[in-house]
Image: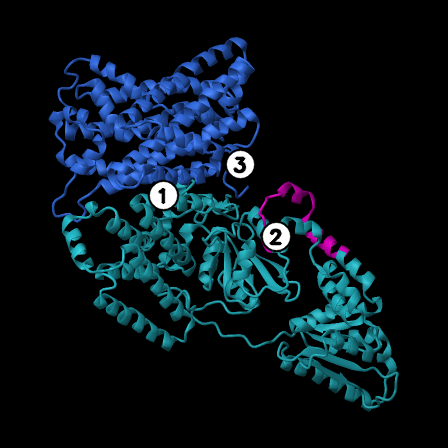
Chain colours: A cyan, B blue
Amino acid sequence: MQFLSDFHSYLNGLEKNQVKIFASTNRYYFFPSEHNKNTGKRGIIVFKRQKQRRELQDKGNTSKNASKNTSENVSKNADKNTSKITGNIDEDIKTIKAALCCSPDLVIRRLKPADSSDDTVVAYAVMYIEGLADRKVIENNVIKPLLKELSQEAKSSSDKAYTTRTSITEKIKNTIASVSNLNETDNFDECINEVLTGNTIFLTSKSKSALVFNTPGWKTRNPEEPISEPSVRGSRDGFVETLQENIVRIRRRVRDPGFAIKKLKVGRRTKTDVAVVYISNIANKDLVEEVVHRIEQINIDEMISAGTLEQFIEDNFLSLFPQIQYTERPDRVVAALMEGRTAIILDNTPFVLIVPATLPMFIQSPEDYYDRWIYSSVIRVLRYLVVLFSLFLPSVYIAYISFHQGLIPTKLAIFIASTREGVPLPSLIEALLMETTLEILREAGIRLPKTIGQAVGIVGGLVIGEAAVRAGIVSPVSVVVVALTAIASFSVPQYAIGIPIRLFRFVLMITAGILGLYGVMLAFIMITVHIVRLKSFGVNYMSPFVPYRPGDWKDFIFRLPVMMMKKRPEILKTEDQWRQGNSGKG
Amino acid sequence: MHITDNPKDKISTVQAIVFISSLTVGAAIITLPRSAARSVNTPDVWASILFGGLIAIIPSIILVKLSQRFPGKTCFQFNRIITGKFLGWILSFLMIAYYTLLAGFEGRMMVELVRVYLLPRTPIEVALMAFLWAGTYLTVSGINPIARAFEFYFPIVIFIFFSVLFLGLQRFELDNLRPLFGQGFKPVLRGIMTTFLTYAGFETMMILTAFMKEPWKAVKVVVIGIGISIAFYVSLSVVVVGVLTVEEIKTLAWPTIALVNSIEYPGGFVENFQVFFLIVWIFAIYTTFVSSHYIACLGLGQISNKAFNSFVYALIPIIYIVALAPQNLEEVFQLGDYIGYFGVFMGGIVPVILLFIAIIRREGCAEKQGEK
């Protein structure tokens, strides 16, 4: 929490003497320059395992020390008087108000006994941010009992016993405020931070500490069925935008005491909460440490979406392939945690990241485990075919038409030749044109409201396709090929893996246009070499296929009966390998 | 409990097996039936290939034993210790030359096939450059990605290769393989010299053992690895001879492709299985090319004490020149034979001498290391 104080001092300083602060802005990074060295360019984390180095310095300590160093720098510059609560209630309120730029949504309720002119009488103030804090809780559990108390006090006419500082806060704490989660603090930085997270600050004149009531209570969306990953037999709830509720969603499914949460903050200004969750007696310690380490290295102003976070912590930012899985489904996260993976939950986004991710994971669906195994296996094989189809179909078509007509079965060759008669474009241009049109249609459909999106589909699919064939610009066979490819690419279960497939499809089409099937093969080789080189958090991207892990092949192309999957995936090197029987054997 | 699979630059036993068999199964799947048939001249080609492979295991065990005396060292490093700096340097240089030639030869075979069967009008220089590019991309990645990539291609190659052979059984005539040893063992023995050359590539164990996580399993690796390529070549020769007869094979430049072309299933949609086989030989040649390119670079790196990466691009022009040096197909085949003899010299004779000297001079640790 120390580094939060830096930020506050920064704000304060900003008001007091702007020139000075801006001149030394670079001091206000929360992570010391030593950490920044590993961060290569901005946002590009160069993953180099420096475990030995890190083992020497306990990680928690480093970051604490680091922020301490920074805060020392800060306190040298900033006004020292502002960091502690003075006890003068008017001054204190002013300071907090100023720190929050006199925001109109900061609610300040002052409470005073009737004879307020008397300076010795204790005054109180309640501060919270409208909408962030639960107003009802504050009113019913803090203000109401206090007012009651005050009026009684007034009746019994100035009982001066309460003027002793300790007894006031103690009394409020013990007899008046009926809030379960309550803290005490004596500095402004914490106060500001608490107010901004939705808590309520309770100031008392003559007291140098403030009470903090835990009263967050903003409106949240109700859980809905995830739009991007609907399922037939899976659970119907999805994640929402609130971190705590998402954690609850996972906790409700895992009653394991080993369920561990590491809370971090990302974003110098947004201070977004990030939770790294894992099952402590399953997940590999190395992995968790690496995840936390990578998140800690992020040095940026704001962290708004899980997608941005993903880009900051992935292994290879140049790759087209997603190296981290994201999902809206709690059941998927729980399954991943139980396999020994780690999930990263970012506040304000319904997408939870799962690491490490491997390529076969993207071709699986949680429902594979809900349906019976033969059906699931067949569907999975189909999906692998679909991936190959949507990747290769247009390029193989181009290669055959423009280079290897001799390799096409005779009847089919004659048929294709007859349909292509009069088509002015070479097959490469034809296919590229149509694939591009398809991509435009897809893009148009995604960003538009649903009703218009359907219209786009009809216009694009039927009208343009039909018209193009009739006009003789494209041949009907290539329309079939492109349409088949499109449908195939829609049946890949996850959006993230569709992107590299779509892009590589274009690459393959061009190489097919230059070198025919030979070009397609070479391009395929280069793609596979790339995949084989990729890693996600130290795990090979193509595992369990490469390097061979025969133990994990039960759940790879085929999904064998769940009774046979007695062990967790080998590739994750879990602490507890057994899922069934033998538990605790390690 | 590191989550990372292998320590840097160490490969698992399975990876080593796949590496060796990917390396030995190369361009020969296209040419072996012809060259073997020419030298054996009887239907016992398969026996010759089988014995050639079994014989190849002997020198490979010798060279494994040799490299096990120098744990963690490749032959570029330990031949200096055995023979002294100057001779060692010459040996290393010969090794590098051998692998460079091999890489060039594989590249040339690739583009020859591409010219005949896929792109008759594309200049072979273009096809060659594309191939070298794709190869370089894998070579620069280092031993671990190379081993993983080979693991990736290996099942694909096995699956397609054996299914194509299985489909080829349709016209298989057992009579074509008869008489069994009709002219005694003499033709078989005559062919062994040719077929033995096919297994050139096992000498790579002198380098690979240094990269193994469990070097004490190197003998197992080389036996299984060569065993797999024996299975490839023997089953290929049985099917090719059984379908096409020895007499026909001798006249064909590419008997394997001829076999694949002969497969025909009327009514089936796919008429041309050549396309599937294309995948096999592209992978087979690609893996051989990459491993020889890598080892040549590694050798250059180790004799000059630099990272191998710095030589990857430098070798490409040399490989390019080697690949384009033969003027016609006959010269290409001749180059292949020379490389085979070269390989036998480097893998069969040199290690024996080196091991002999090493034992006499008591270099390296003689006891079995690592057996915990």
Pick the front one: A65 or A124: A65
Tell me where residue B321 appears, x and y as whole percent.
Answer: 40, 30
Badge number at residue A202: none
Asked if residue B20 can be seen in this view, the reply is: no
Residue assigned mark 2: A41
State yes or no: discs 1 and 2 in contact (Cβ < 8 Å): no
User: In screen coordinates, is A98 left or right of A343?
Assistant: right
Residue flagged by tag 1: what amino acid is it?
A: Leu
The kind of secondary structure element at disc 1 is helix
Residue assigned mark 3: B8
The segment highlighted magenta reads: A43-69
What's the residue at 19%, 20% (across, down)?
B44
Identify whether B325 is placed above or below A318.
above
Identify whether B261 is placed above or below A358.
above
For the residues beneath circles 2 and 3, the answer to whether they share a chain is no
Q: Label 2, label 3: how many angstroms apart (C-alpha)? A: 25 Å
What's the residue at 73%, 68% (across, down)?
A190
Residue assigned mark 1: A522
Residue flagged by tag 3: what amino acid is it?
A: Lys
Pick the front one: B281 or B58: B281
Seen from this angle, which residue lies furthest top? B360
Residue flagged by tag 2: what amino acid is it?
A: Lys
Tell me where residue A505 appears, x and y as whole percent.
Answer: 36, 54
